[in-house]
Image (cartoon, rainbow, N blue to C red):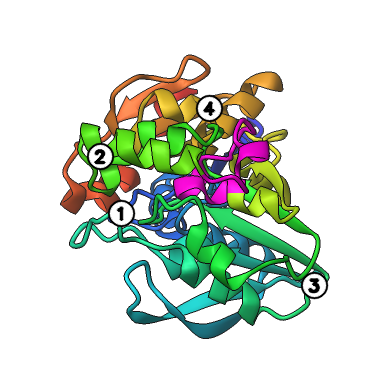
Amino acid sequence: TSRPRRPMPRAHALACPASLKGVLSARDAAAALAEGLRTWAEVDELPVADGGEGTLDVLDAALRGEWRETEVADAFGRLRRARWLELPSGVAAVEAAEATPLDPSRLDPFAASSRGLGELIRAVGRPRELLVCLGGTANVDGGAGLLEVLNELPAPTRVACDVDVPLIDAARLFAAQKGASREQALELEARLLAMPKLAPHAVLPGAGAAGGLGAALASLGGELLPGALLVLDLVGFDPIGYDLVVTGEGTVDRTTARGKAPGEVARRCAAVEVRCLVFGGQVVEPLELAETVALSGDPARSRQDLVELGRAARSRL
């Protein structure tokens, strides 16, 4: 009699996407990917972020913190409820986009203020350590609003910057998405470079994050760090032991490799020779370190696209 054939061991996959801004949170994107991947593999979910909008949700998914809430002024002085996260380690994590989010329905980079982030930081009290996550904000004020509220930070502070650019690029590269014309961007640039408190920190990588908030926080003693590296370390990202890692974001372009979370995931996978698949709702420029796949481009289909990508990813091994 023939021996019964032993079942083949199932592959082991990791779903670790960033958010698809305005469409799916990183946590929801990971769940959709995992649904498809589970048709053929054992799957772990680890949503990732780079310091921008949704970073607190990613930290909570991995570390299970306690949510707190306070009332702050948004970028235009309207009251809003802003959350912050108390991590089990005693670190208080705040996200600039919780206080002064970029709202496409109101874009006015000359009027938008970062004051609300200062109010949010003031509300956390005196934690053991403060983590400030920068990205996705409406302001290009060089932290002028924040500095009206804070003249010191409440604890040793690390700043997770979603981009690695110096102060001059806060307006040059990003003011357009906040509503500025080319001429207005030059005016905003001049305004930022004329702020004496920021000058000693202007060339630091990350100084231009969140409309110059990086430089403002550095002026108060905050340590500017690449957000993707910091967040991946905090959530315990480790590709070793996986047959396939799937990551991605809404748009894959040249910035993906310059500090965005999927780019850092791909880099770490390449370093240990783990297969990595990167998706984009749109792919403007593929990553060199990993196979890059474009989704349908239809936001209404994003969840189903990710389920189908997970199912089809078996063929990539």
Question: Which one is in front, 214 or 257?
Answer: 214
x and y, in percent, of residue 295 in the image? 26, 35
- Secondary element at tag 4: strand
Is residue 211 found inside the magenta-colored segment of the image? Answer: yes
- 3D distance between C-alphas at marks 1 and 4: 41 Å
Q: Residue at x 60, y 52 (%)?
A: 216
Along the polypeptide, which appears first: circle 2 or circle 1?
1
Question: Type of residue at label 2?
Answer: Gln
Q: Which of pointers 4 and 2 lies earlier in the amino acid sequence?
A: 2
Q: Give the labeled residue for mark 4.
A: 276
Q: Quadrant of residue 191?
A: top left
Whichever of labels 3 and 1 marks the residue nearer the N terminus, that label is: 3
Q: Is residue 104 left or right of residue 196?
A: left
Q: Is residue 32 visible?
A: yes
State if disc 1 and disc 2 touch (CB < 8 Å). yes
Q: Which residues are magenta?
A: 195-215
Image quadrant in which the N terminus is located: top right
For mark 3, what is the residue? 90
Q: Earlier in the sequence, mark 4 or mark 3?
A: 3
Q: Secondary structure at mark 1?
A: loop
Q: CA distance from mark 2 to mark 1?
A: 9 Å
Q: Please, is residue 222 above or below residue 294 in the view?
A: below
Q: Which residue is mark 1?
A: 110
Which of label 4 and label 2 is nearer to you? 2
Outermost residue toward the top in this view? 288
- Judging by the rendered image, the residue that carries numbered circle 2 is 184
Q: Depth-wise, is mark 1 or mark 4 nearer the camera? A: 1
Q: Position of residue 178 (x, y in %)?
A: 29, 48
Q: Nearest the camera: 13 or 55? A: 55
Residues packed near mark 1 inside 10 Å, few (<14), some (14 to 19) or many (20 plus): some
Q: CA distance from mark 4 to mark 2?
A: 41 Å
Mark 2 lies on a secondary structure that is helix
